[in-house]
Image (spheres, helix red, strand yellow):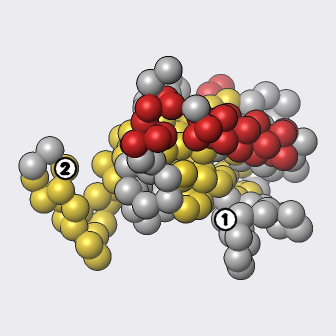
Amino acid sequence: MKSASKFIAFGALLTAAQAGFPHVVLEDQAALAGSSYKAVLRVGHGCAGAPTSAIRVLLPAGFQGAKPMPKAGWTLSTRSEQLPQPYTSHGKTVSEDVVEISWTATAKEHWLPDAWYDEFVLRGTLPASAGPLWFKVLQSCEPGRLDWVEVPAQGTSTKGLKAPAALLEVIPSGPASHAAHAH
């Protein structure tokens, strides 16, 4: 029960800390190591009043088997690379994996207006070890661009960063964590 309380408190703290900032954030900002994770990236505004025409997500190292969710009116593309360290998934060795996902509006009527927000969704498997994962997001607008790619030199505080990447805090999993989540 103690781990579940820590997980809930940590999530509430992150949500409260991020609520007042107008940048790209993850809906769920903490998840258990080694688990499947649905990343919902919330885009809260355009670029200096201009509508958003494309979103590109650079996936953090260790995020495995990424699969994006299509969006009506947006073209979806992925880019894969050879992995420095292959991994095993469902009994097969994976040596190349998705490292980047892009959504691009197919026409002006599908652009995301500055006054609206939307969500861009993907899923994958988290690394087995705990620690911060940073999802870097490149937001293209007409005209202009915002690169949400800043990562603190140390720790996870984004205080003072003008364009922070979206943080996912991967928390330890273990027998106590799994038992607490079962309730």
First in sequence, mark 2 or 1: give its number: 2
* Residue at 31%, 48% in the rendered image: 65
In the image, residue 94 above or below residue 111: below
- The vertical placement of 167 against 111, above or below, is below
Q: Secondary structure at mark 2?
A: strand
The residue at the point 66 percent across, 53 percent down is 166
Please say if 154 is above or below 130.
Answer: below
Q: Position of residue 131 (x, y in %)?
A: 55, 62
As displayed, is residue 98 above or below residue 16?
below
Front in this rendered view, residue 79 or 141: 79
Q: Nearer the viewer, residue 157 or 50?
A: 157
Q: What residue type is disc 2 on?
A: Ser
Residue 160 locus on image (x, y percent):
88, 67
Residue highlighted by disc 2: 89
From the top left corner, tell me how far across and down residue 60 is, in percent.
49, 61
Which residue: 9% across, 49% down? 91
Q: Name the element at disc 1.
A: loop
Q: Which residue is mark 1?
A: 149
Q: Residue at x 22, y 61 (%)?
A: 87
Question: Which amino acid type is marked by label 1?
Answer: Val
> Which dot marks residue 158?
none
Assess disc 2: are there few (<14), some (14-19) or many (≥20) residues with their C-alpha within 10 Å of its C-alpha: few
Q: Are marks 2 and 1 in contact (CB under 8 Å)?
A: no
Would you call the spot at circle 1 few (<14 residues within 10 Å), some (14-19), or many (20 or more)? some
Give the distance between the C-alpha atoms of the residues marked 2 and 1, in whole angstroms. Answer: 29 Å
